[in-house]
Image (tube, rainbow, N blue to C red):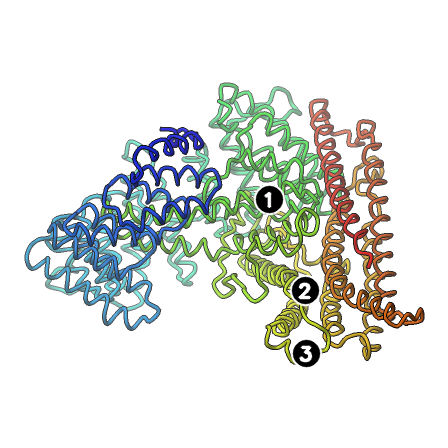
Amino acid sequence: DYLDNGNNKMAIQQADKLLKKHKDLHCAKVLKAIGLQRTGKQDEAYALAQEVAALEPTDDNSLQALTILYREMHRPELVTKLYEAAVKKVPNSEEYHSHLFMAYARVGEYKKMQQAGMALYKIVPKNPYYFWSVMSLIMQSISAQDENLSKTMFLPLAERMVEKMVKEDKIEAEAEVELYYMILERLEKYKEALDVVRGKLGEKLTSELQSRENKCMAMYKKLRRWPECNALSRRLLLKNSDDWQFYITYFDSVFQLIDESWTPPAEEEHSLEGEVHCSVEQAVEFIEERITEESKSSRPLRGPYLAKLELIRRLRHRGCNDEYKLGDPEELMFQYFKKFGDKPCCFTDLKVFVDLLSPSQYSKFIQQLLEVIPLSAAAENEVALPGDIKALQQHLCVVQLSRLLGIYHAMDKKEKLTVVRELMFRYRHGLEFGKSCLKTELQFSDYYCLLAVHLLLDLWLEGEEAAVWQCLTLLEEGLAHSPSNAQFKLLLIRIYCRLGAFEPVAELYSSLDAKHIQHDTIGYLLTRYAESLGHYAAASQSCNFALRFFHSNQKDTSEYIIQAYKYGAFEKIPEFIAFRNRLNSSLHFAQVRTERMLLDLLLEANISTSLEESIKSMSLSPEEDDIPWKDLRDNRDLTVLFSWDPKDRDISEEHRKLSLEEETLWLRIRSLTLRLVSGLPTLSHTIQPKNSEKTAENGVSSRIDTIRSLLQQLEAAADSGKKFLEQKIQYPVLGPPPTRMAGFFSNGSCQCQTSLFYLVSDIYELDTNGLEDSAEIQERIGNSFKSLVERLTDLFNKCKGDLIEVRDGTLKTHPNLLENLVFFVETISIALWVSSYCDSVLRPFKSNLQKKKKKKKESSVAMPPVFTHFLDYVTELQTLTSNVIDHIKGLEIILTALKLEELSLKDTLLLQEEKKFTKTVQGKVQSSYHHSVQEIGELLKKRLDTIKKLKI
């Protein structure tokens, strides 16, 4: 009970009391171990657990408790050993055998699962156990590296096992038929699979709607039996004329039959499935019949009308002249709007078909739609408003279509502002219809506000600085009326980040309440900007959110797989495994892992713990690369923000490809930087000078080779990055955010960091050659120090300037200065880690020299120049860092003194209620910049303390 309530200390005390009375009570020991594990004493817990496990317990309580403990330790492989021992001692226990099977399922040991399944079936001849074994064979075939092996060994064996059950008439459940179908499909025995589905066994397929028909259709397609495809889809459409997937199959098959010049046989049936249509005339007639039928139905169906437009599109695509038989697309879309215009889906339905209109028809088409909407104006020159929700939906649909057809894009600035005003007027009027809406419901007129913001974003991109503030103002107002609107929040997140203000974003993102897979699909909105805008604490937190999800995915997926076995949902098991693999090779997962470790080093290494300890605790090593470069999957949802832009302005496949390429290049640079930093402690001073013969043995020289090879890879990655940026790619404003790569090159951080790692190589050389005959190396090191200080000073100069300035009554932010500051802090930290390596090499040299001085009692032993170079370098680093800290203090003072209230935005378009939102927005941006500057300043002060310790 104590454990269940989370009171772990009491649980440990109770277990100890019990153990005093009964020394050998296994269960009490394990419960104590669980308490220890949960209070963070992992080693003690593990030792206790192993003590019990060594005795190979067979009582249910101990086994269950140990299973729970091992699961919490993330050691599922230990559970298998437990039950292997238990099964040996109690060979006829059905329960232990099934636990053993599930334990193997958790670790994916398919061969052992197959054996465990058969062992179970021998003890208790129940069908599910037999088919567990069959499924494990299929899993062996899926996971086999050699495709040939899976098709010649695992799958045929599985097929024979099922056939045996079929012959003996022992097939009982639907899951077993599904499994048989799955095996035949994987063996590409489509005809046999079809016979199973159409035969007596197929009658068991009842749990899903049209399960049998769908499977038949899939096999007909594989076998390219188009007459059957056509007849089956025709028959299903007669049953339900609103099922879109069957329209697609129907059209596909009609045109396939036309291309093959197929003709129906004179005497016999057209096909196994009945009558076949094999000409455009028949297709046209069939669709017209569906529309006539629809008009008699009690509820309006969209399918038949959209099928007509789809058929026109296909005929036009094929260059046929038959489309006139179906009517004019403009008229058909107009009629569709009259019938379904008050449904929110009307826009998305028509969006697919607008390319059937020619650009010259656009304005006329929109005008025609507007004329049928019942709007009424109070006076002559006023905006005509809808009287009810239906009319509002119709008008909204037209406004969305206008944006999609590029009508708003063609306007000039003045016209766009007029439209924004009108849309906001309509938005506020529409709020009356939603007075009774709950907080969790969206307002009916929210899209008006979103569309107005999209128009303002266009103006901002055309150079109108005030427009972006108005975007934020309108979105904050929208969010006040509709607190659950995710689109408002996502757009606010994107715009605040573009302006360099991260503080409001964290709260917005957490109110989105992202669940499960969304941490992978939209997490990039958060992790891309947190650190680069100087919000280190928030960055740590956002990385943790994402990593927690990715790590729990491993554990959760094995639970799903076990449930699938228990309930016979066999076809889901490969899907779960594919899902797990897709997440493990997620681009976002790799990025978050890398950035998280760099961030931890930045915040802690050589501040609260030594660099060596930090790297050890992350189990980092320069030789290991755990990123699956070949299989990286881009799981980001780049269309999560609604967009009504025409095709040429919207995010394209090309944009996706380029964005993935850019993200991968940047990830490679970051990952190599991390590995280079993790190599520094491995070089630390372990060798006596001039003992270079010995060095090869103790592995240190191979470590410097690792560093040099990583450095070459970093150079190559940087070159690829520069080449990529030469293309000057512009993503759409709501498309993927660009990486930090451009800033990394343009502000000089890249050159700085690379030369720091070259310096490591030189210092290492000095270390192995000694001081006597190394004047040349010493000079080289001296020059490196000088050029590094110059480069760091250049980088600092690129951070100077006002973060927020007021120009002509408008605010302008400079987020690039903030990004440069963050890069400066990172580069200076790497410089300090390298300096502490220099320090560890030079200190022993200096103490040796001083000993020599004492021996010879000469005061004139010359100090090698490298010492003075290093001391000058450290002093200059200290001065530079102090200057940056002073600069940051100055920024803080300016930001605090900036009185935004006095800023009357000269935009007379702002209404009184909008002004209060504008104040809020500007306050948030100012506060966020202030917070960023504070966090950066704090971190630099800690780094300054580290520099002061570097005096040899």
537 relative to 694, above or below = above
* Image side of residue 949 versus residue 134, left or right: right
Give x and y (percent) for residue 626: 51, 61
Q: Earlier in the sequence, mark 2 or mark 3?
A: 2
Label 2 element class: loop
- Report which quarter residue 117 is drawn in: bottom left
Residue at image mark 3: 692
Q: Which of 918 and 293 is in front in this view?
A: 918
For the residues labelled 3 and 1, the Cα–Cα distance comes to 49 Å
Residue at image mark 2: 684
Q: Are marks 2 and 3 in contact (CB under 8 Å)?
A: no
511 relative to 116, above or below = above
Label 1 element class: helix
Q: Earlier in the sequence, mark 3 or mark 1?
A: 1
Residue 274 visible in image: no
Neighbor class of circle 3 (other Cα within 10 Å; few <14, some 14-19, many 20+) is some
Residue 14 visible in image: yes
Q: Nearer the viewer, residue 776 or 209?
A: 776
* Residue type highlighted by circle 1: Leu
* Image side of residue 235 versus residue 846, left or right: left
Give x and y (percent) for residue 446: 55, 31
Instruction: Determine which of the numbered discs, if any, sits on residue 526 in the image.
Output: 1
Q: Which of 854 and 449 is in front in this view?
A: 854
271 relative to 345, above or below = below
* Residue type highlighted by circle 3: Ser
